[in-house]
Image (cartoon, rainbow, N blue to C red):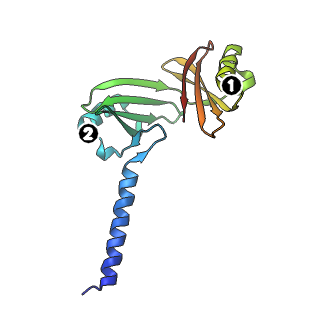
């Protein structure tokens, strides 16, 4: 017969394990997206992602729900660092596939003049921590990470001609 202390300890351990499993299965990302295990992805979504990924390994799947609609974003990774981002709705309908090259760190001084000007304007005197470039579906994009006064970050995306693509606070 097990003692009350032993049962209490087993209950505590079981609850802790369940809590940790739940936390691991739905890990929040900074963007409000949730990383989900492949086993939790609906079959129709798995089929579409697998068809689009081909031989590429699926690195991570995130789920974001907005207004009751869930969108799954699967990321693949090749040995050369390039990857695909495959967006699928919860019924398995393909939304889009984005091809990305590996991100490469770039010296601010070596950026095209128009790109430097746009990033400087958006940074508004705050520290530019790093700039990277990558090709997304054949389009060159520069991404600057700006440290804000509240220690948050502003992500500034700029096209090769200096056009502002987007800004996002993290």
Q: Which of 96 and 102 is in front in this view?
A: 96
Q: Where is residue 90 in the image (x, y as percent from the top left)?
A: 27, 33
Quarter occupied by the C terminus = top right
Residue 152 seen in the figure: yes
**What residue do we see at 58% from left, 29% from top?**
155
Q: How many labels does the image show?
A: 2
Badge 2 is on which residue? 42
**What residue do we see at 29% from left, 37% from top?**
46
Q: Which of the 4 image quarters holds residue 86?
A: top left
Q: Where is residue 10 in the image (x, y as percent from the top left)?
A: 33, 75
Q: Determine whether, in the image, residue 1 is placed left or right of residue 58.
A: left
Q: Determine whether, in the image, residue 113 is placed left or right of residue 25.
A: right
Q: Where is residue 51 in the image (x, y as percent from the top left)?
A: 31, 30
Q: Determine whether, in the image, residue 114 is placed left or right of residue 2.
A: right
Q: Where is residue 94 in the image (x, y as percent from the top left)?
A: 31, 25
Q: Closer to the N terminus: mark 2 or mark 1?
A: 2
Q: Distance between the residues labelled 2 and 1?
A: 44 Å
Give the label on residue 124, or none.
Answer: 1
**What residue do we see at 61% from left, 15% from top?**
160
Q: Which of 99 and 128 is in front in this view?
A: 128
Quarter occupied by the N terminus = bottom left
């Amino acid at each position: 017969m097990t003692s009350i202390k032993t049962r209490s300890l087993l209950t505590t351990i079981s609850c802790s394990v369940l809590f940790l499993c739940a936390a691991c299965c739905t890990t929040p990302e900074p963007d409000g997206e949730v990383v989900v295990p492949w086993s939790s992805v609906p079959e129709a979504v798995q089929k579409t992602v697998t068809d689009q990924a081909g031989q590429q390994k699926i690195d991570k799947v995130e789920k974001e729900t907005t207004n009751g609609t869930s969108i799954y974003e699967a990321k693949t990774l090749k040995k050369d660092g390039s990857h695909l981002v495959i967006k699928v709705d919860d019924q398995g309908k393909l939304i889009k596939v984005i091809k990305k090259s590996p991100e490469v760190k770039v010296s601010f001084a070596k950026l095209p003049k128009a790109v430097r000007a746009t990033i400087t304007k958006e940074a508004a005197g705050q520290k530019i921590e790093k700039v990277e470039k990558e090709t997304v579906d054949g389009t060159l994009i520069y991404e600057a990470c700006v440290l804000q006064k509240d220690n948050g970050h502003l992500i500034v995306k700029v096209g090769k001609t200096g056009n502002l693509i987007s800004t996002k606070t993290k």
